Amino acid sequence: MPATSPAHPRRRRRTNRLLVTAAGVLTVGALAAAALPGSASAGEQGGKAHSHQHGRYQDVQLLSFNDLHGNLEPPTGSSGRVTELQPDGTTKTIDAGGAEYLATHLRQARKGNAYSITAAGGDMVGASPLISGLFHDEPTIEALNKLDLDVTSVGNHEFDEGAKELARLQNGGCHPTDGCYTDKKFQGADFPYLSANVLDEKTEKPLLKPYWVWKKRDVKVGFIGVTLEGTPNIVSAEGVKGLVFKDEVETINKYAKELRRKGVKSIVALIHEGGFPASQNYNYDCDAPGAGDGISGPIADIAKNVSPEVDALVTGHTHNAYVCTIPDPAGNPRMVTSAASFGRLYTDTTLTYDRRTGDIARTAVESANHVVSRDVPKAPDMTRLIDKWNTLAAPIGNRAIGHISGDIVKDGTESPLGDLIADAQLAYARTLDPETDLALMNPGGVRASLTYAASGGEGDGVVTFAEAFTVQPFANTVNLQTFTGEQLIQALKEQVSGSNEAAPKILQVSDGLTYTLDLTKSGADRVVTDSIRLNGEAIDPSASYRVATNSFLAGGGDGFTTLGQGADDLVGDDDLKALEQYLTANSSAGSPLAPPAADRITIVR
C-alpha cells in the first residue's frame, strides 16, 4: 500500500475516534507508582485504582493484545493455557483464548470507560489455523472488526504473503487467485495497520502510514507502529521482496519528534519485538527486585534507547507475558508490556492524560494482564462468524488423514513433532529423488502440537486435515538441494552461532542423523563436529549429501545462510502434503503412530 493512501472513509466510526493517520498499537502496560493528587494508590490486578474523569486529568483506557495468529477458536494443548502465580507461591493452569471469549472480556472491560482505545501489536494473521488460514485470513480481519479494534502495528507474519496481500487485508477486495469466498466482497480492515520502519525499496517511503492519532474532545494519544528490523530473516524472501526494514529505535524516535511537532505529546510505541521473562507465570512481578530485572532480550535494549518523548511501549513477537518498568534514557519510569499470544490474555492499561501539558502523567500509569478465561458467555456475533467460516472449511478440514497413540508435542530443543515432520519430508523427498539422505526442519515452522484428544467429532487419536494445517500453515514447498559435508556441518553450527548465537534455533532432524549439542560451550563449538553421524557414519566434509528442507530454509531463512547455497535445486509439493502422506501411509485406527522418542540430538547441559 502506498504511503499516501487515504484514510478509510467506509469504516464504521465511534464518536471518540478521529483517524488522523494510519497507526498500529499492541499491548500497553502498567506502572503502579506515585499517585496523582486526589487519586488512590495502585490496586490489585483487575480493578482501577483511581479515576480522573473531570478537570485537569483524564483516564484513558488502553486495551491491547498481540500475536493472535488467526486463533479464532480456542487454541488447544499448551497453546491454549496460561499459568497463574497464586498468593501462596503455587501455580494454577487456566484454559484461555478463543475469539468468542476475547470479545466478551473486551466488551466487559470497556464498560464505564468513556475514553477507551483497543489496539494490537502485530501478527494478527499468519501461521493461522485452517478456519482462517484457508481463506487467506479474511475471517480474522472480520473478527477484529467486530472486536472494535482501533489500530495495530504490523508484525513479521503480516508479510508471509507479501506486501500486496497485506494491502488487500487493509483495503479489501477478493483474493487475486482464489477469488471471493462468499457472496459478499471482502471489505478489509476497519482499523489501520502501521509500519513506520518498513519502507518501499524504490520510493524509500513507509509502506503503510507510520503513526495514527486517537482523539476524543481535547484528549489526543499518538501511536507509532514498527515491526522487528530482523523481519527479512524470519519471513520468506518472496514475502519481503522490494522492502527495507529499518532500525526500530531510530524510527520510533524520528516519528515521536514529528508527532510532538504536530502537537501530540502523549505517545505509545507499538513494537513487534519482545523479551524473555524470568517467569512463565503471566502475573509475575517483572520489577522484582528492581525495575525491569525480570525481562531480558531485544526489547530491554530497545526500551533503554527509545526517546523519553514516548510514554509506553507495547510489545510482542516472543509470545511471552510481562508488565515491566524500564527507565527511559532520561531515567524516568516507563511501562513495557506484552500479552502472550493466541488471544489468551489482554492488557488493560490506564494512561492518565494531563490536559494542562497534553502529556501522560507517567508515574500514574497502571497496567495488568488479564486472562481471557472461558468461564464467561460466548459473544453471539463471534460464534456466528466462526460457524460461517467453519461451514465453508468443514469439507476440507474434517477429513481424517492419520491416527496417533498419544500427544505428539512441539515442545523441547528436539521435539517429537519436529522429528515426525522431518521424517515426513525425508519420505516425501525420496519419492522425488531416491538418493535423498536427510531432512532438516526449522523449529519455528512447527506451530502447534498434535493432540490425542479429539478437537471435534472426529474421535480421540484421529488427526484431521485441519489439525495438520494448524501445525504447518505456511504453504512452504519441500525443496531438495545438494551440499558438501563441510556445508552440512556449517549449517548445523549456524543453529548456535551468528545471528542464532544468543537465541539458538535447533533444527529438527530426520531419522539417521545424530549429533551432540554441548550447551556448556559457546558459539559454534556447541555443535560437536566429531559427533555428527548419518546412519552411524561420520560426515565426510568432501562428500556430497542430498538434503530436503522447506522453501523457507532453502532461501536461507532463520539465519541459515548456508542452506541457501545448495546446488541442483529440485522444488517439490507443499510441505503439508508431505505430512499428510506420511501420516496416512504410516498409521491406521488399529495401528496408530506413536510419538517419536526425540533422541537424535544428545544434549549436554
Image (tube, grey):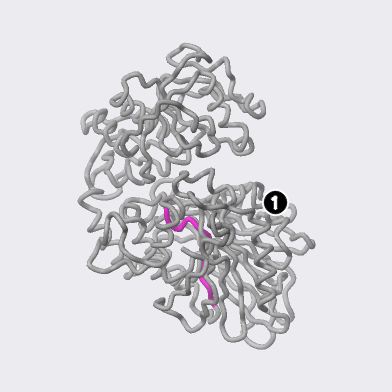
Residue drawn at (69%, 85%), measured in percent from left and top?
56
Quadrant occupied by the C terminus: top right
Q: Quadrant of residue 291?
A: bottom right
Furthest toward the bottom, the residue is 55
Residue 377 in percent (x, y) is at 37, 67
Residue 172 in sight from this viewpoint: yes
Residue 404 in percent (x, y) is at 30, 34
Residue drawn at (54%, 26%), measured in percent from left and top?
492
Residue drawn at (49%, 33%), measured in percent from left and top?
564
Residue 490 in percent (x, y) is at 56, 25
Q: Quadrant of residue 497?
A: top right
Residue drawn at (49%, 19%), measured in percent from left and top?
484
Furthest toward the front, the residue is 202
Q: Is residue 121 magenta?
A: yes
| Residue in front for this viewpoint, 540 or 411 | 540
Residue 9 in percent (x, y) is at 42, 78
User: Is 463 placed above or below 355 here?
Assistant: above
**Residue highlighted by disc 1:** 301
Q: Which amino acid is tagged 1?
A: Asp
Furthest toward the right, the residue is 330
User: Is 513 placed above or below 124 here?
Assistant: above
Q: Is residue 479 magenta?
A: no
Q: How many marks can you see?
A: 1
State which region is magenta.
Answer: 116-126
Element type at marker 1?
helix
Query: Crowding near pointer 1: few (<14 within 10 Å), some, many (20+)?
Result: few
Residue 369 in sight from this viewpoint: no
